[in-house]
Image (spheres, grey):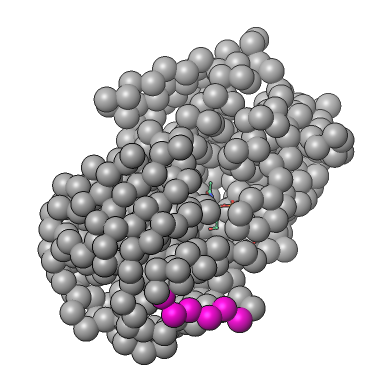
Amino acid sequence: MQKLLIKGKKELIGNIIISGSKNATLPILAASILANNVKLSNVPLVKDIFTMLDLLKFIGLKVKIKKNKKIIQLNCNEKNINTLAPYKLVKTMRAGVLVLGPLLTKFKKAKVSLPGGCAIGTRPVDLHLFALKKLGAKIKIKDGYIIAEAKKGLLGANIKFPSISVGATENALLAAVGAKGQTILSNCAIEPEILDLILFLKKLGFNIKIFGRKIYVIGKNSIKKKINHKIIFDRIEAGTYLILANLIGKKIKIQKIDPKILKYEINTLKKMGAKITSAKNSIFVLENKGLKKISIVTKPYPGFPTDLQAQLMVLMTQAKGISKIKENIFENRFMHVPELKRMGANIKITNKTAIIYGPTKLTGAEVMATDLRASVSLVMAGLIADNRTIINRIYHLDRGYEFLESKLRKCDAIIRRI
Ligand code: UD1
């Protein structure tokens, strides 16, 4: 089993180039079922993407990967399609459930394994199924599988989500584009990754409009035979390095991003004393000497993302005073706290809120990664800790951070995989 070894306290200086977004690529890969020939560029070559590609290959798509160019080409030949997403490919990555909408709308049936829970919570898919039923799908759950069919095809509908979900918005959208008539989706998630998916679907020939949290699926023009799409930058990866730059950066430039998309994160860090200058496609961060406390609540975009909560918590351990994080999206997303406490952090949890007392000195320890973002928070803690930190179970990190060690080493960090 691989581990990461980190020697802390080394100030970071350098440029970090941000990869394409994993969370935008996954639904766009699922959307490729609706297309013929797709060429995607700026694809992050991380584990979750390969898992999704394995699923698409199982379904019958032809996949070509040009690793050095980060390009993926997909071809969907309708004759060879298998409308099944098996347990072994969905259990490791929940986004596999996103093939349900496109398979159902294009092939009128689909059998997709229920993804089950994960470390950060139960994560049901009831909202996905709620939307598909409104579009006319007949759905039953049998032997751990979602069995869906729409013999005469799906029909457009007005659907108001009872609560905001990224995955349910994506699945509903991917089904609605193939339905007969118009669909209005209300109370949608409007994460930048969903806007990237909409851009992709529009290129494909679908007529979609978005106003606030409402998405209108109006119809389609002729579906293009061939389309190219460049994946949007990974705002969570960018946010992670932005927080890290404030933690132990001397001079860090974060490149190939759009700072406007990170407005909430930048403002939060500025309230903590960050010295950040934004340019058109980059952010420049200077050492933050007097870290100030802050309280935040995680919310759907454009609020503070749950996916940056663990990373911000590490920064809060170094801020003067009492900081607070209320986790409003997932019920079990403080798994990193016991590990951070083992490194010396002073954190208390009451219900959904973590209370962080700072500043505290962190000391290296052997720790265990529990999920993707928790893992990176431990790397960050290791980079500011005294002595050596060993991080176990780093396969979580490989699911979503492309070239983490080499990006950090380019900024002088002492980190290696053993
Ligand atoms: C996506 C992101 C993940 C991020 C999360 C919230 C991808 C691949 N993953 O996950 O990184 O942390 O958004 O920003 O893009 N819920 C239900 N029923 C449902 C669906 C969701 O109750 O059918 C609940 C969830 O348990 C959670 C909340 O809704 O409490 C939000 O989850 P959701 O936005 O759906 O997250 P994902 O799409 O799974």
Residue in view at x 27 percent, y 44 percent: 416
**Residue 36: image location, x then y, percent:** 52, 19
Q: Is residue 169 above or below residue 36?
A: below
Residue 231 versus residue 309 in the image, above or below = above
Quadrant, the C terminus: top left
Which percent across, then down, holds residue 51?
53, 31
The answer to whether 272 is drawn above or below residue 371 in the figure is below
Q: Residue 147, how many percent across, how many down?
A: 81, 33
Residue 213 lies left or right of residue 124; in this view the side is left
Give the quadrant of ligand 1. bottom right
Position of 79 with respect to 236 (left or right) is right
Q: From the viewer's perspective, is 44 left or right of 337? A: left
Give the image quarter of residue 394. top left
Residue in view at x 64 percent, y 35 percent: 90
The magenta stretch is 345-350
- Please, which residue is most extreme toward the top here? 79
Q: Is residue 112 left or right of residue 64?
A: right
Q: Using the rendered view, name the quadrant where residue 150 is placed.
A: top right
Which of 246/260 is in front?
246
